[in-house]
Image: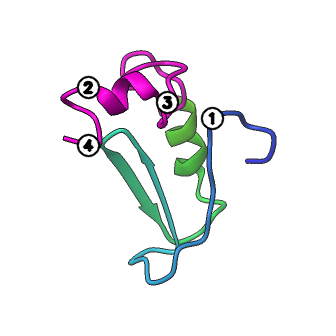
Amino acid sequence: MAGVDHTMLSPYEDLDAAVSVQSWGRQLKVDFADDPRLEAFVRIYRLNPETTPEIGATCSNPEFAASPRGPGS
């Protein structure tokens, strides 16, 4: 998925599947990186205004961090 903005890929030991993708409460686990469901998952959920809480918001948004719903609560 090189060159795709707003995605992050990283290895993680001891997963119960070879590949696992997440997007705001949705998850897909597959055995191989060439599984066509991966591309479909990214196409459907990446920057989708119906499934992403705030398009363009970062995880380090200071307003969110200070809000009652933020990480400090």
Label 1 to label 3: alpha-carbon separation: 13 Å
**Viewer-proximal residue among 17 and 56:** 56
Comparing labels 2 and 1, the label whose residue is closer to the camera: 2
Q: Mark 2 points at which residue?
A: 67
Badge 2 amino acid: Ser
Label 2 to label 1: alpha-carbon separation: 23 Å
Q: Give the range drawn in magenta.
A: 44-73
Label 4 to label 3: alpha-carbon separation: 31 Å
Which tag, 4 or 1, sits closer to the chain's start? 1
Q: x%, y% of residue 15?
A: 43, 77
Q: Mark 4 points at which residue?
A: 72
Label 2 to label 3: alpha-carbon separation: 29 Å
Side of 3 where 15 appears, left or right = left
Comparing labels 4 and 3, the label whose residue is closer to the camera: 4
Badge 1 amino acid: His
Residue 67 sits inside the magenta stretch: yes
**Above or below: residue 22 compared with residue 66:** below
Q: Mark 1 points at which residue?
A: 6
Side of 10 where 5 appears, left or right = right
- For label 4, the SS is loop
**Viewer-proximal residue among 62 and 10:** 62
Q: Mark 3 points at which residue?
A: 44
Comparing labels 2 and 3, the label whose residue is closer to the camera: 2
Mark 1, other Cα within 10 Å: few <14 / some 14–19 / many ≥20: few
Badge 4 amino acid: Gly
- For label 3, the SS is helix
Which tag, 2 or 1, sits closer to the chain's start? 1
**Above or below: residue 45 compared with residue 1:** above
Which tag, 4 or 3, sits closer to the chain's start? 3
Badge 3 amino acid: Ile
**Viewer-proximal residue among 72 and 28:** 72
Comparing labels 1 and 3, the label whose residue is closer to the camera: 1
